[in-house]
Amino acid sequence: MTTQLFPTTPSTSVSAPEAAPGSQAPTLVPSWTVTLADGATLLLAEGGTGRPVLLLHGGGGLPTVLGLATHLAEHAHVLTPTHPGWDGTPRPESIASIADLAVLYGGLLRQLDLYDVVVVGSSLGGWIGAELAAHDAEGRIAHLVLVDAVGIEVPGEPITDFFALDARGVAEHSFHDSERFFTDPATLPAAELARMGGNRTTMQALAGDPYMHDPSLRDRLRSVATPTTVVWGESDRIVTPAYGRAYADSFGTGAELVVVPAAGHLPHLEQPSATYAVLDRIVAARG
């Protein structure tokens, strides 16, 4: 079913928009380090109360989802980790693939004893979310949301080689309105360039070969019974809407495909109102 809807310096905390008089705006607390049962550590931002939402950022790092995290924290308990190796965090040798990240987050849900979880993943974070759902033998995930996710191989719909693009090319492929979102790297401070370069290195290590997909994932998704919504920017040129349709069709029980007009690879940045409306509906419909 298809429904048609009409980069920055990282921060360790983010506040919600100003609250209405007499109410208190939710906040994401400063990132704190969680030690998991297997000894692995994870940098985690957390905020809000209500239904648990695990929000997984894409290759651009935590800053690309902070606005979305703040919005969701208005009515949900949002956990927003920084993937090991991103935004200057260390990556242990045990994290050598996207599947390893999925195992890490499965351990986080287990340690926090969370159920009825909505997992939202953007781009590469969507790939992690799909892997997490495929391994969710304990039934902790109640709904999976993939936002312009990578991770599967679709004949005739190749994933654009991000590593071959310059900054202008990344903007043109990622956004409907590339002029609005393009930033000349020459204007960025050294710390931000170092962060971006580190993220790129980690992406190449974990998802460079095979490029941005696991050849086995699409077949494994056919056994995933978790309700799934696939949100896609109509103008995405990193992974096209046709790729998104194939992703939705890969789930054995079927998945809803929501196409967001006038948006590219990051619809939550380019068309936040339309994207938030989809996610709010899902979070409100508790399992």
Image: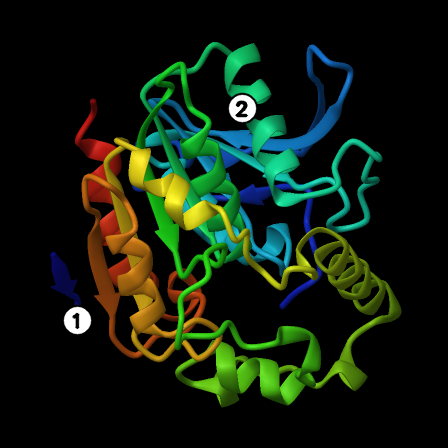
Name the secondary structure under disc 1. Answer: loop
Q: Which residue is mark 1?
A: 6
Q: Which quarter of the figure has residue 49?
A: top left
Name the secondary structure under disc 2. Answer: helix
Q: Is tag 1's residue or tag 2's residue first in the polypeptide sequence?
A: 1
Q: Which quarter of the figure has residue 221?
A: top left
Q: Residue at x 33, y 56 (%)?
A: 247
Q: How is the protein colored in the picture?
A: rainbow
Q: Residue at x 13, y 61 (%)?
A: 3
Mark 1 or mark 2, whichever is nearer to me:
2
* Circle 2 residues within 10 Å: few <14, some 14–19, many ≥20: many
- The N terminus sits in image quarter: bottom left
Q: Is residue 189 above or below residue 47?
A: below
Give residue 195's position: percent from left, percent from top. 79, 59
Q: Which residue is mark 2?
A: 106
Gap in Å between the C-alphas at discs 1 and 2?
A: 35 Å
- Horizontally, residue 231 falls left or right of residue 205, namely left
Give residue 121's position: percent from left, percent from top. 45, 47
Q: Residue at x 46, y 44 (%)?
A: 69
Q: Is residue 213 above or below residue 34?
A: below
Give residue 68's position: percent from left, percent from top. 43, 50
Give residue 251's position: percent from left, percent from top. 28, 45
- Give amino acid for label 2: Gly
- Horizontally, residue 215 falls left or right of residue 201, namely left
Q: How many marks?
A: 2
**Residue 19 in sight here:** no
- Horizontally, residue 244 falls left or right of residue 128, namely left
- The C terminus sits in image quarter: top left
Q: Residue at x 75, y 64 (%)?
A: 196
- Give amino acid for label 1: Phe
